[in-house]
Each structure stands twice: as structure tokens, then as C-alpha cells.
Amino acid sequence: MSAHTCTSADLDGLASQLEGEFHCHETMRSLYATDASEYQEQPLAMALPRTEGDLAQLVAFARRHGLGLIPRAAGTSLAGQVVGPGSVVDVGRHLNRILAVDAPRRRGRVKPGVVRNELNLALKPYRLFFAPETSTPNRAMIGGMVGNNSCGAN
């Protein structure tokens, strides 16, 4: 399927069903056309999902219309992983909570938009830390780190 098998009406319909934001206008698309790499590509749209239900709707819509989804956290990727012609899905604005810390089992549950340094601040009282040492720990989000297998020097 081609990357654009939906109409403006289809996109407007999706936007009206989401609790979060969905943008197709030039300004937002331009803001999300780059990451920390040298690559640039204008996406079809960009979403700021508020809930897991929004994510499910975005995935279903993309599947129905043959569109790509580009998960994005902080956009610190150095190899162009979060740019492309599909819909950018930015999890950083709303899906950014630490849900639970289970210190005895050395586990935690987080939303994908939690920043690595913020997680480590929450883990510090338990004498725990999330170990990957990326070059951007004050911006890199857990979802992006997991999605890109980011680990830094250690």
C-alpha cells in the first residue's frame, strides 16, 4: 500500500476520536521532521497520545490505511530512527509517569515517556538505578532507549 491511502476527512475523524492531540498542519509536521541526526523527512501527521487507548486507535488506523507509525520519545536519535513519512507518535508529553517501583524485585513500571534521569531520581531512595548511560540522560526517554537499544558506554 502507498503511504497515503487516507483522506483529510479520515485524518480529521481520527483526531476527533483521540483524547490526546493529532496534528496535520505544516508547523507541527515541520517540527517533527527532524531528530538529532542529519536526516529530515516531513511526516504525514503527528500525535501526542494521552492514553493507551489513543495508542490502540492510532495503531488500528495505521493498519486500516496502510500508514506507518513512527514512535518517538525525546528525538535524540542519531541515526534518523524517528523521522519518516508516516505519523509520528510522541509519547513524551502525556505518557510520562512512573507507575510503580518494586524495590525487593528490582523492578519498575513506567510509561514510555519517562526521562532516564527522572527515573533514576525516583529509584535513588531504594539504592537502585536504570543503568544505560546514554549521551543525553536528561532528555532520553525510556521508550526511546528500549526501542533503539540505547546503552551508551555501559
Image (tube, rainbow, N blue to C red):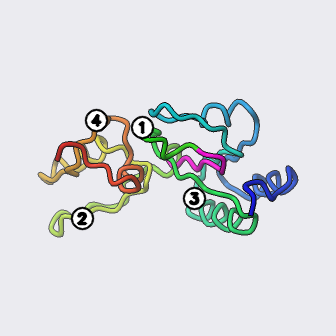
Using the numbered discs, state the Cα–Cα distance from disc 1 to disc 4 in whole angstroms: 9 Å
Return the disc, 2 or 1, that comes first in the chain's sequence.
1
Q: List the residue tagged with mark 3.
A: 51
Q: Between disc 1 and disc 3, whose residue precedes?
A: 3
Measure how far apart labels 2 and 3 are at the Cα level: 23 Å
Q: Which residue is mark 4?
A: 135
Residue type highlighted by circle 1: Thr
Q: Residues within 10 Å of mark 2 (few under 14, many from 20)?
A: few
Residue tagged 1: 76
Amino acid at the residue labelled 3:
Thr
**Where's residue 70, x and y in %?**
57, 52
Look at label 2 and name its amino acid: Arg
> For the point 31% across and 44% down, which residue is it?
116
Name the residue at 66% across, 47% down: 85
- Give left or right: position of 62 versus 80: right
Answer yes or no: do the residues labelled 1 and 4 have beta carbons within 8 Å? yes
Question: Helix, strand, or loop for circle 2?
Answer: strand
Q: CA distance from mark 1 to mark 3?
A: 23 Å
- Is the residue under label 3 in contact with that under label 2 (CB below 8 Å)? no
Say which mark, if any, is on residue 84: none
